[in-house]
Amino acid sequence: MLNISTPISEKHSYNNFSMKEKSPIGKINLRGNLDNKEFVSTVGKILGMILPNESCGSSTKEKITSLWLGPNEWLIVSNEEMSKETNAYELEHVLFDNISKTNLGSVTNVTDQFTIFSLSGSNIFKILSKSCPFDFDEFEDNKVIQTILNHVDITLHKKNGTNVDLYVRRSFANHLWKWLKDSASLI
């Protein structure tokens, strides 16, 4: 059973920068080979979308977003909150039955492993640049990067110039949340 308790229960806004935790959001790690036509076809039918096949890409549909993490790895993220009472994510079961059980790839529910910080405002990249080696001047809309922020591994999905989702392991969420608050208050 997934642990969907939220590590962060507050929202903050400072100087054209707002942050809040998105919770609970279903997240599935999907692995497979894009050269395998059966894998691509099966996933496409289930998701109703084509997986991003170029580095740092993303695909979005009404209910889900697919983030490219590597040549054979994607993070499938729900665009809707999960029910805290049922603690189930139907898409995981459908993908597992059609991908993992048929040895086409691997499906792992990582909902309880990562939390998502929704960052918005015009100062996002000024704050992130304080402790991140990535050059945000080259970061295009609808792109995904994996990098380090204040010594913590993160994944960033830039939706547009003023809206970013930051994925961080739950064990580092409180540390990174406090760092973001401190950094934002100093701008």
Image: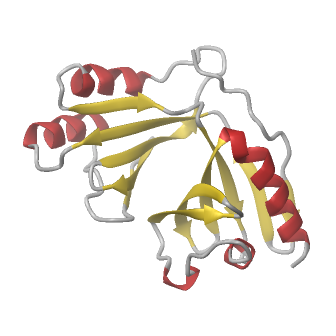
Instruction: Decide which of 168, 18 is in the foreground and name it.
Output: 168
Q: Is residue 89 above or below residue 177?
A: above
**Quadrant of the image containing the N terminus:** top right
Residue 86 at x, y percent in the picture: 59, 14
Residue 158: name its quadrant.
Answer: bottom right
Q: Is residue 106 above or below residue 186?
A: above
Instruction: Decide which of 142, 71 is in the foreground and name it.
Output: 71
**Quadrant of the image containing the C terminus:** bottom right
Q: Identify the residue at horizontal 31%, vertical 23% (top origin).
A: 96
For this view, does 172 lie left or right of residue 88? right
Instruction: Decide which of 169, 41 is in the foreground and name it.
Output: 169
Residue 11 at x, y percent in the picture: 84, 50
For this view, does 170 lie left or right of residue 50? right
Q: Residue furthest bottom?
A: 137
Instruction: Decide which of 68, 171 is in the foreground and name it.
Output: 171
Residue 2 at x, y percent in the picture: 59, 21
Q: Residue furthest front?
A: 151
Residue 59: name its quadrant.
Answer: bottom left
For this view, does 58 lie left or right of residue 134? left
Q: How many marks?
A: 0
Give the image's coloring scheme. Answer: secondary structure
Q: Identify the residue at horizontal 37%, vertical 55% (top origin).
A: 68
Q: Is residue 19 above or below residue 8?
A: below
Q: Identify the residue at horizontal 70%, vertical 39% (top origin).
A: 171
